[in-house]
Amino acid sequence: MTKKEFLASVIVRTVQWLSARSVRIRLLTNAVVERLFVTEQMVISPARPRFTSDELIANLDEYNKASERYFADYKDHAYLVGKPYTDTMNFARRLFDIGVLVHWLRLSPGEVLVELGAGTCWLSHFINRFGCRTIAIDISPTALEIGRALFKRDVLTNWDLDPQFLPYDGHRIPLPDGHVDKMLVYDAFHHVPNQSEILTEMARVLKPGGIVAMCEPGQGHGASDLSKLEMDEWGVLENDIFVEELGQLAVTCGFTSASVVPVNLPLSVEVPTDRLRGFLQGKELRHYWSQWAQAFQDVNYILLYKGEYVPTTRNPQRARALIESVRDQVDMRVGAGAELSVRLTNTGDTKWLTGIPTQAGWTRLGGHLHSRERGIPALDYDWYRGELSHDVEPGEAITVNVRLPAIDTPGHYRVVFDLVAEQVLWFAHRDSPTTELRIDVS
């Protein structure tokens, strides 16, 4: 035994002896071991791309032709349009993927969404049913025609939303600048040879504050047996996604930032109920961490931001308002209304959307009519609605000229003013303060 090995063995025995006699030292020792193990698990050997950029660009036209050939020659159209239901082996994962993407897109009914690489549009159809105006874009005209047939077959398709099916040439997205709110790419970007060009196009068509959400396979996908079989049989590109490189590339192409969401269904973990408390206290981290680390490499949920995301009343976060009436009481005659001014200040982090009648998130001043006597239900919960002149940013204040409706019965009333995002919520439901106005009718 060398001098170094002897010294190390003495240190180990000493730590073990102290750990057996002190709870604090034992906990500290365990923490160090866990930290060393986690660090070891986090050491991931960098993979190398299967193809160089020059190789990908040189074969761009062939890859694009192969994508059309794939859908034109594929025999089982029922399988393609029946996803996620027909994909029985991955049904649960598809639902999980969609949930993650929709959640992190902060997607809301009424928004315009592009699905790039839509294929047979089964996911676009899903989003159409949710209430978004979908624009399905794909390199394959055949795939889009199959998708259009899927939309036509379902009697619940919302044609009022004007769903679109746009083929593109693999270079330019056929939409004007700043045309869409959100963009979805599901298991498709790893088929794109000219990623820089397409990322630039994606940033161009997004509105400021827009988000792209992608779900893509992780490193090693292109070298898998199934990917090799797909490339040999169809000629389509099966490449790897390197999230660090993709994030850097996205920023150079017009996006502000990129991030990943470290979740995954196939390799999620179960915790026995009798060990849950210890799990929540951080014990047994070594047992679970390797599964989490592997899951993070297998599937990537990637978010690209164009500018700063500001939540709106379609999908609010902190929906709060300061409501200030110039008067706290008005006198009205039977059959006659009254006028007053109300000042509204956006004290939350959510932009109030206006000018979108019938759409979710349309923000107005509302009033609930009550008897002056407390403890009884509202006489008319939707008694008053007042329009806002324009969208209201966080921190902004506006004045609303209120014309109260007539009341036909003499008495003593009160109106509770609140902000409402139509089809979404009343602000008071998020603990935003209301303001009361007393009304005497004679």
Image (cartoon, rainbow, N blue to C red):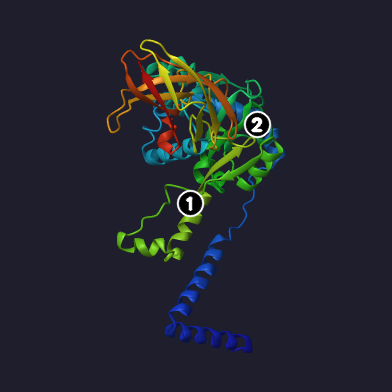
For marks 1 and 2 on the same chain, the one whose residue lies earlier in the sequence: 2
Q: Nearer the viewer, mark 1 or mark 2?
A: 2
Residue at 50% in and 86% down: 13
Q: Position of residue 352 (x, y in %)?
A: 53, 28
Disc 2 marks which amino acid? Ala
> Which of the pair 340/353 is nearer the observer?
340
Q: Looking at the figure, which quarter contains the N terminus?
A: bottom right
**Image mark count:** 2
Q: Quadrant of residue 280?
A: bottom left
Q: Which residue is mark 2?
A: 203
The crowding category of the residue bearing disc 1, from other C-alpha atoms within 10 Å (few below 14, some 14 to 19, many at least 20), is: some
Specify the farthest residue to the top. Answer: 335
Q: Position of residue 354 (x, y in %)?
A: 53, 22
Q: Is residue 250 visible?
A: yes
Q: Position of residue 406 (x, y in %)?
A: 39, 13
> Which of the pair 405/336 is nearer the observer?
336
Disc 1 marks which amino acid? Ala
The crowding category of the residue bearing disc 2, from other C-alpha atoms within 10 Å (few below 14, some 14 to 19, many at least 20), is: many
Q: Which residue is mark 1?
A: 295
Q: CA distance from mark 1 to mark 2?
A: 29 Å
Q: Quadrant of residue 192?
A: top right
Residue at 49% in and 42% down: 226
248 shown above or below 73 = below
Residue at 38% in and 41% down: 92
Could you say whether the residue bearing mark 2 is in a helix, strand or loop?
helix
